[in-house]
Amino acid sequence: MPELPEVECVRRSIERRVVGRRVVAVELRRADILQPAGGMRRGTAPVVTTRGGAGETCTRLLRGQAVIRAERHGKRLAIVAKDGSAVGVHLGMSGRLLVFDPETGAGDEPFSGVHTHAVWRLDDGSRLAFVDHRRFGGLWDWSASDGPQAWFAGMGPDALAIGPVTLWRGLGGTRRGLKAALLDQQVVAGLGNIYADELLFNARLHPLTPANRISQERAAGLVRRVRTLLNRAIAAGGSTLRDYRDGDGASGGYQLRHRVYGRAGLPCGRRSCPGRVTSATVAGRTTAWCPVCQPEKRH
DNA sequence: AACACCGCCTGAGCGC
DNA sequence: TGCGCTCAGGCGGTGT
């Protein structure tokens, strides 16, 4: 499930293998993977595609442009061209951005599969593909005047950049449980179900703790812990449960270090803690925590 | 404001 | 073996 660490690993793959290249051609195989800018998502409104029907070669989506950088904010990724235009990418649940280099030969399969929705041909002969079998992800086509900045600004501060006071204020503005508040991308951008649970475990906070009861000191602790957690996950290549791969098709390793996520019924991983990880639906999500380390404090 | 719930989508994993 | 069921989840929508 791509959350901030996984998206960051993909960003770095793009930086290594796509930045500096020029896009020779773009093939959009599924027009409905392209999201209307600022509009509603697929399935809730008629999809308005102004260019590039399925199987067609696109006139935008970076065609003819030199890629100069890859930016990330929360779980959103933008591949930016020299002229300021950009492609926005959201991986959703199962999205992948894969780079294939014919010189290495391996990994061609995803490019011919039915779940490959867009393919960029680069000037060095390599190809970048957006593959997403569940199609919860999507692409955005930003012009030089749009840019991805408004898209990024439409969400809260990035989880790796947020400061303690900002987080404290964000949490203080809601009586929701911490789990729900941390998943709210307007409060802090980048956390999903896995890292929200891991963060709460590390901070020894119950998922239902009212967000506005977090002191400034606790918020500062959360900021320190979220940075440590996410940086460690990035260093491990992210968490691969089923679908996630980086741009080179490599799995992550951080799933082996999850302390509570996916460990319901197992002993708490904290040394000498007699508790067992429990799970329940909180804020509409399967949530795992240790009832001993993370007791629910009433009043 | 803050919930619950729905739809989107596929494949893994299960019981039978 | 193979069928049908449930589940997973990000996100943005509607309804309460």
Image: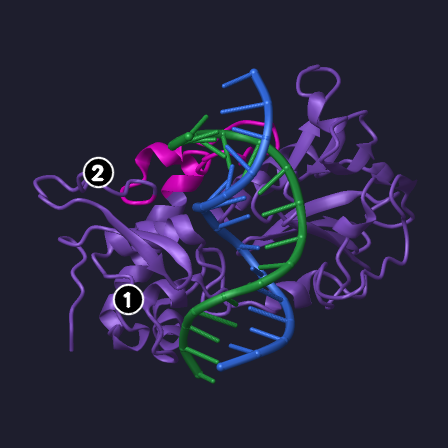
Chain colours: A purple, B green, C blue
Q: What stretch is highlighted in magenta?
A: A232-261
Question: Mainly helix, strand or loop, the magenta region?
Answer: loop
- x and y percent of residue A25 in the render? 88, 37
Magenta region includes residue A254: yes
Q: In this view, does A42 lie to the left or right of A202?
A: right
- x and y percent of residue A192 in the render? 45, 53
Q: Which residue is drawn at 82% across and 54% down?
A: A83
Evaluate whether label 2 is on the same chain as label 1.
yes
Q: Residue A266 carries which label?
A: 2
Q: What residue type is labelled 2?
A: Leu
- Answer yes or no: is residue A88 visible: no
Q: In this view, does A34 lie to the left or right of B13?
A: right
Q: Which residue is drawn at 29% across and 67% down?
A: A219
Q: Please tell me which of labels 2 and 1 falls first in the chain.
A: 1
Quadrant assignment for the C terminus of chain A: bottom left
Q: Residue at x 83, y 38 (%)?
A: A23
Magenta region includes residue A8: no
**Callout 1: few (<14), some (14-19), or many (20+) C-alpha neighbours within 10 Å?**
some
- Answer yes or no: is residue A45 visible: yes
Q: Which amino acid does label 1 sit on?
A: Leu
Q: How many labels does the image show?
A: 2
- Residue tagged 1: A208
Q: Is residue A247 left or right of residue A65?
A: left
